[in-house]
């Protein structure tokens, strides 16, 4: 999702790579779930998020959509996001105020309080200084913080997905309503509603689906 803000106003003024250290570690988030409340459509899911949830929870995307996810418009594109429930809290938050899907949580949740800045067909990271309510105690390598296997493949995938969706979003205002609707339905069917084989490599499946459209 695009954010029209001056990065200098929301960050520590530094740009990081995946191998850099940043002051991220809070020890434990116990007693705090501020970042899981009031996020609305901020937690937009990408196809790998859907794959990870389907695999981790043993549910289809349609089953997830029936309870914990919803569709929202982000920059002209219809994409799934986490559904907020009682007290505007994430529907995956348990009674103890802890994330019930922590091992399978979406990429934006893993990233927080980092953000990504995209340029030259790739991305780097920045630290959002006013987002997290906990005091940052120590530095940790960004790659370790995001905690995703095959990290180089994941980063390459993130770039492909971002610029693919951005390209559609940039053209969306000029598309006739019916055309945009068809594009959105196609995206949802190809990348989300068609379940992934969770026993097979995600990136190979993604590449096949992407190549069918590009």
Image: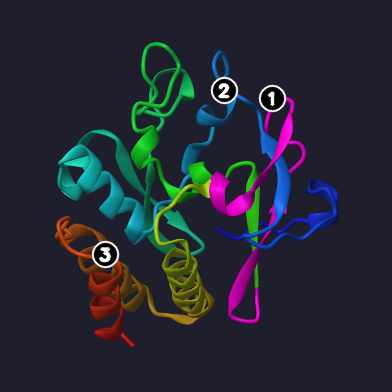
Q: Quadrant of residue 153?
A: bottom left
Q: Which of 188 and 195 is in front in this view?
A: 195
In the drawing, what numbered circle is on residue 29?
Answer: 2
Which of the two discs, 1 and 3, labels the residue nearer the N terminus?
1
Quarter containing the C terminus: bottom left
**Label 2–label 1 contact, CB within 8 A:** yes
User: Magenta segment, which residues?
Assistant: 119-145
Q: In which quarter of the image is residue 23?
A: top right
User: Label 3, on which residue?
Assistant: 202
Q: Disc 2 on helix, strand or loop?
A: loop
Across and down, in percent, residue 100 comes to 34, 26
Which of the two discs, 2 and 1, labels the residue nearer the N terminus?
2
Quarter containing the N terminus: bottom right
In this rendering, is residue 54 above or below 7? above
In the drawing, what numbered circle is on residue 134?
Answer: 1
> Residue sitting at 29 percent across and 69 percent down?
187
Q: Disc 1 on helix, strand or loop?
A: loop
Q: Which of 109 and 82 is in front in this view?
A: 109
Rounded to the nearest angstrom, the CA distance separating label 2 from label 3 is 30 Å
Which class describes the residues within 10 Å of circle 2: few (<14), some (14-19), or many (20+)? few
């Amino acid at each position: 999702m695009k954010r029209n803000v001056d990065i200098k106003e929301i960050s520590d003024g530094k740009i990081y790579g995946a191998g850099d250290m940043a002051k991220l570690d809070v020890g434990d988030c116990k007693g705090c779930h501020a970042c899981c409340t009031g996020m609305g459509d901020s937690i937009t899911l990408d196809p790998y998020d859907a794959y990870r949830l389907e695999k981790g929870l043993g549910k289809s995307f349609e089953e997830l959509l029936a309870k914990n996810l919803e569709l929202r418009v982000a920059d002209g594109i219809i994409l799934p996001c986490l559904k907020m429930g009682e007290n505007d809290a994430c529907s995956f938050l348990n009674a103890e105020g802890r994330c019930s899907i922590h091992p399978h949580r979406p990429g934006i949740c893993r990233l927080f309080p980092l953000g990504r800045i995209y340029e030259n067909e790739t991305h780097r990271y920045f630290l959002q200084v006013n987002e997290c309510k906990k005091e940052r105690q120590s530095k940790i390598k960004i790659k370790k913080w995001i905690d995703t296997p095959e990290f180089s493949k994941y980063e390459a995938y993130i770039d492909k997905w971002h610029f693919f969706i951005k390209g559609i979003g940039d053209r969306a205002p000029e598309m006739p309503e019916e055309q945009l609707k068809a594009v959105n339905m196609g995206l949802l069917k190809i990348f989300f509603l068609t379940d992934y084989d969770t026993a097979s490599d995600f990136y190979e499946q993604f590449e096949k689906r992407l190549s069918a459209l590009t």
